[in-house]
Image (cartoon, rainbow, N blue to C red):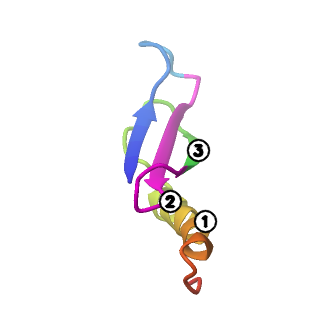
Amino acid sequence: MGADVNHPAPGDRLRPSFCSVIASMDSRACRYSASLRAQGPRVEIISDLEAMTVELFKVLLPMAHLIPI
């Protein structure tokens, strides 16, 4: 899994920051799924990280033939 936050240009306090979490969906790290969100301007911490992670697990579990949580 990996995560990143991208911000608008310096000085721009009106546009949102965008965050993403990406996860490998197979043992060879060839298949990926991502979860994306907009959040408040200049917010460095991903405020919805838990929900984004759960979203990715809901994609992974059926692919791995596991029972969803």
Q: Earlier in the sequence, mark 2 or mark 3?
A: 2
| Residue 7 seen anywhere in this rendered image of the structure | yes
Whether residue 23 is situated above or below residue 39 in the rendered picture: below
Residue at 45% from the left image edge and 54% from the top image edge: 23
Q: Residue at x 59, y 24 (%)?
A: 15
Question: Is 37 in front, or is 29?
Answer: 29
**Residue 22 sits inside the magenta stretch:** yes
> In this figure, which residue is indicated by the disc labeled 2?
25
Q: Three-letter amino acid code at disc 1?
A: Val
Category of crowding for the residue at label 1, using alpha-carbon neighbours closer than 10 angstroms: few (below 14), some (14–19), many (at least 20): some
**Which is nearer the N-term, disc 3 or disc 1?**
3
Q: Is residue 27 above or below residue 21?
A: below
Q: Nearer the viewer, residue 57 or 50?
A: 57
Q: CA distance from mark 3 to mark 1?
A: 17 Å
Q: Magenta part of the protein: which range?
A: 14-32
**How many numbered discs?**
3
The amino acid sitting under disc 3 is Arg
Question: What number is the disc on residue 59?
Answer: 1
Q: Which residue is mark 3?
A: 37
Q: CA distance from mark 1 to mark 2?
A: 8 Å
Residue 56, horizontal then vertical, whole percent:
54, 62
Q: Position of residue 42 (x, y in %)?
A: 43, 30
Outermost residue, front side: 28
Verify CB contact (< 8 Å) between mark 1 and mark 2.
Answer: yes
Q: Return the x and y of residue 10 as percentages of the image width and height.
A: 41, 13
N-term-proximal mark, 1 vs 2: 2
What's under tag 2, amino acid-wise? Met
Q: Which mark is residue 18?
A: none
Whether residue 47 is visible: no
